[in-house]
Image: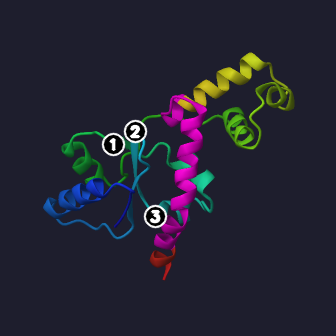
Amino acid sequence: MKILSRDNYFISGMTNIIKRMPVFNTDDLIVFDTGQHYVYIFHSAELQKHKISDPYRALLYFCDYRIMRDAPVKEYIQCLLTEETNKELIPSLSGREEWVIKILFGEPDADELSERLCISRKTFSAHKVKVLRKFGVKNLNLLHSLLQTWTEHWPSIQSELHCEAT
């Protein structure tokens, strides 16, 4: 198991939770605390299974595998013991929403982006709001921060995948 966090208190707490749990296989489990509202809990085998090779695609895929950072200990234990990890019933991004989010990271001008996608500014804004809601963030700055955190920790997540393959 790998716990990725900048918060030593969180790491200590997760370590204590795991020590008190019944024995279970945690070899490929990753607990990723982004420092925002959610903690992502997933198996590194999912990366290989779905051929996820970059932090952007990982965030898109694992946005469904999260638990509230301030969730009770019981929920963390339940999540850790669940075979499928904590796959929430959050709708996946539509194709148009993925386009909007990809373009947003390249250019911040909404008028130009809506023109490029051949949609109205209002439609573009509606897609943007849906994307933010699905990622569980309130604004684009938090979404950028979330992606940046995934990018910074990506080498650690990938190293877990390479350790598993050998």
Q: Amino acid at mark 3?
A: Ser
Tags 3 and 2 in contact by the CB under 8 Å rule? no
- Left or right: 142 as drawn, with respect to 3: right
> Residue 113's quadrant in the figure?
top right
Q: Residue at x 34, y 70 (%)?
A: 27
Q: How many marks?
A: 3
Question: Rounded to the nearest whole Å, what is the CA distance between mark 3 and mark 2?
Answer: 22 Å
Residue that carries the numbered disc 1 in the rendered image: 69
Image location of residue 10, percent across then percent down = 29, 53
The quadrant holding residue 131 is top right
Is the residue marked by circle 2 packed among few (<14), some (14-19), or many (20+) residues within 10 Å?
Answer: some
Q: Which residue is mark 2?
A: 37
Farthest residue, direction bottom: 166
Asked if disc 1 and disc 2 are in contact, CB closer than 8 Å, the reply is yes
Secondary element under disc 1, as helix, strand or loop, is: loop
80 to the left or right of 90: left
**Residue at (46, 78) in percent of width and height:** 163
Question: How far is mark 1 from mark 3, CA to CA?
Answer: 20 Å
The answer to whether residue 137 is magenta is yes
Residue 109 location in percent, x, y? 78, 30
Residue 44 tag number: 3
Residue type for callout 2: His
Whether residue 50 appears in magenta in the rendering, the answer is no
Q: Position of residue 17 (x, y in %)?
A: 19, 56
**Is 120 drawn above or below residue 158 in the view shown?**
above
Residue 117 in the image: above or below residue 149: above
Mark sitting on residue 136: none
Give the residues in magenta. Answer: 133-161
Tell me the kind of residue under disc 1: Arg
